[in-house]
Amino acid sequence: MKLVRFLHRDIPRFGRLANDQIEMISGDPFNSIEPGAVSMNLDKVQLLAPVAPSKIVAVGLNYRDHAKELGMELPEEPIIFLKPPSSVIGSSEPVVYPPESKHVEYEAELAIVIGKTASHITVDAAQKHILGYTCANDITARDLQKRDGQWARAKGFDTFCPLGPHIETDFDPLDVEITLKKNGIVQQKSPTANMVYNVFELVCFISGVMTLFPGDVVLTGTPPGVGSVKIGDLVEVSIDGIGSLTNKII
Ligand code: ZN
């Protein structure tokens, strides 16, 4: 099932997407997915990021070949950091290049959307706590990341967390292809099978540190091929079985 979030009479609502038709859900998909009476055409609504998380937990160095590309050792445990909820934008919304930086990069990532509150759960229980998956771009001001020594500013600017276009609930995350195109040219392409820690191991590990709430998002790390963007570039993250997240740099 494809879940979207959109504005209906100026109020964010969830809907179920099928054949370019959106059936509005009464309530939210974390409790029950009961389609409401209202149905509308996809091209008649303004889509939002598919979720408004209370936090975004991201994982560094989680692809074997990306760690190799950077000449870094594989981490002995997942390396986690936070991006603020205020950094989230949806597909087709612009990423704003901050004047503080001279080197902004894209990072295509598979995003997990949490469905049920998760605290100290096992790897086996992780799947039950996941609502679905979407595409993410972990935009990073690489020069500020190096200069600051910690990552809050470099990864926390407004618009630095594009998510979307929708949440796919029927999805096998363990071996799908993730691709990033810049201005139509492929820059990143890797199977998620190359992750050091898979999605279930990540949710288990993070839930042992901080409680994950419904709607929280986990970014699972980026494959090799990261590179810079400039104003005017169009970046597109595509994941087999989900779709494409497209954002222009302004
Ligand atoms: Zn990342």
Image (cartoon, helix red, strand yellow):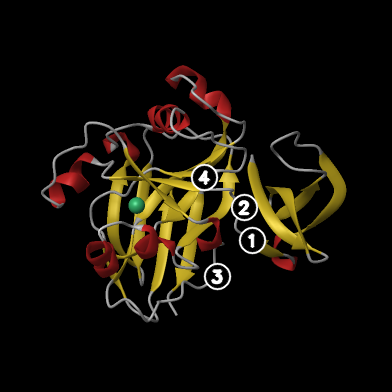
Disc 1 and disc 4 in contact, CB within 8 angstroms: no
Q: Which residue in the protein does label 4 denote? A: 217
Disc 1 and disc 2 in contact, CB within 8 angstroms: yes
Percent position of residue 14, x then y:
73, 50
Q: Is residue 67 left or right of residue 34?
A: left
- Mark 4 element type: strand
Q: Residue at x 43, y 62 (%)?
A: 156
Percent position of residue 217, x then y:
51, 45
Ligand 1 near label 3 (Cβ, under 8 Å)?
no
- Mark 3 element type: loop
Q: Which residue in the protein does label 1 denote? A: 48
Q: Nearer the viewer, mark 1 or mark 2?
A: 2
Could you tell me how far apart the alpha carbons at marks 3 and 4 are, in whole angstroms? 19 Å
Could you tell me how far apart the alpha carbons at marks 1 and 3 are, in whole angstroms? 9 Å
Q: Which of pointers 3 and 2 lies earlier in the amino acid sequence?
A: 2
Q: Which amino acid, by three-letter code, is at mark 1?
A: Leu
